[in-house]
Image: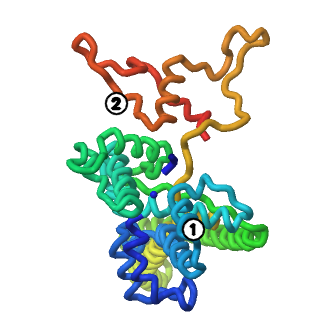
Amino acid sequence: MKRKGTLFLILLGAMSSAVAEGPRQFNDEQLTFFESKIRPVRVAHKADQSMLIKALRYRDYLIEAYQKDKPFDRFVREQIAGDLLPAGSPTERAERITATGFLMVGDMEIVEPDQAKLEADHIDTQVSKIGMTFLGMTLGCVRCHDHKFDPLELSDYYGIAGMLRSSPSTHKIPFGVWSLLNSTVLPETSEQLAVRQKLEADHEAKLAEMKAERAKLEAEKKSVAEELALELVQLEQAPKVVADASVSEATPVRGETTALAEVVSHAPAKKEALIKRHDNLAEQIKKLGPAIQQAGFFRSKAPRAFAMHDGGGIQSGFTYGETDHMGYRVVAGKIHIHDLHATMLHLLGIDYKRLTWNHLGRDFRLTDVHGSVVREILA
């Protein structure tokens, strides 16, 4: 068993009147209903348009499946393990990957600092969806105790949870306590790839233009700052120069002193103009910064969707490490037997650091105090 939807039942009523005109004909009332059931979509709508698009791909999948009268057995399989099913074309492959968004979208506390709790809670949501949609029963309570009446035990719950954990659904981002749902790149046809490459080329040209504009503004700002500094020095020295000039015997014409005083009187206005220009340039540069950062973040136009991606496996045809020419000593990529055990437990969906047993008054784990997952060999 590899992995999945309460969501389908929740959305069927909302979709029924939206499919006549195609997948995009989803009116505001129905979309609001949809967003009320899928929290990440609401959060993404406020924060990140790309997140919203990734989540709504699953919505479109549901509508198209309903519109095309997809056989229910295939509909169920695609949502549970679409990424593991064979596909005859890139379009079909993308559709089946998108279908697994059923397990991805849902309540998620994206600012949960305890990553282990975040992972366990999200898996609990996935298990509950499977139970309520396909088994007609709640499975969330089995997280803590055996069912009182149904033949379900803790071992059943954690057996399913372990299989789901082998396909990670969330990840921690590099800053703060934020976490996000995993997204998967969708396969493209040659025509779709050509269109995307053109979009990316246009995007790169626009990004280069913004960077050039920022460099030009920064150079001008530096020049204005230097001119302003010189003006401030001259303005500070000007009263003394005028005073010296007015009493100097070397001043042959009184009009020259008057002209010098007139120049000094206009200096504050020039200073104000330079300050205003400097501030204006600084404001333009400040606005360009976030725009360039956002454009860099969205460089890739590859289609992505919140979807499951099977993580329980080893890369095929892969060699890790290297020995000497005699095959006797390890010269690269050396791992310990504890590393091997940790990797095997990880592939089974078990956290090797938390699986312990008590012996002689101390908690032991299978890898003792050693071991780490060899992630380079994971598929």
Q: Amino acid at mark 1?
A: Ala
Looking at the image, tell me whether mark 1 or mark 2 is earlier in sequence order.
Answer: 1
Depth check, mark 1 against mark 2: the one in front is 2
Where, quadrant-wise, is the C terminus in this rendering? top right
Expressed as whole percent of the image width and height from the top left, the position of residue 343 reads: 52, 29
Q: Is residue 42 left or right of residue 251?
A: left
Q: Note whether 262 is above or below 117 in the view shown.
A: below
Of helix, strand and loop, which one carries label 1? Answer: helix
Q: Residue at x 55, y 72 (%)?
A: 61
Q: Is residue 198 left or right of residue 36?
A: right
Expressed as whole percent of the image width and height from the top left, the position of residue 111 reads: 32, 55
Expressed as whole percent of the image width and height from the top left, the position of residue 106 reads: 38, 63
Q: Which mark is residue 28?
A: none
Expressed as whole percent of the image width and height from the top left, the position of residue 144 reads: 23, 44
Q: Amino acid at mark 2?
A: Arg
Q: Is residue 247 among the parts visible in the rendering?
A: no
Residue 229 vs residue 341, the one in the foreground: 341
The residues bearing labels 1 and 2 have C-alpha atoms spaced at a distance of 41 Å
Q: Residue at x 34, y 38 (%)?
A: 155
Of helix, strand and loop, which one carries label 2? Answer: loop
- The crowd level at tag 2 (other Cα within 10 Å; few <14, some 14-19, many 20+) is few
Q: Residue at x 40, y 82 (%)?
A: 13
Residue 31 vs residue 277, the one in the foreground: 31
Q: Note whether 159 is above or below 96 in the view shown.
A: above
Q: Which mark is residue 295?
A: 1
Identify residue for label 2.
354
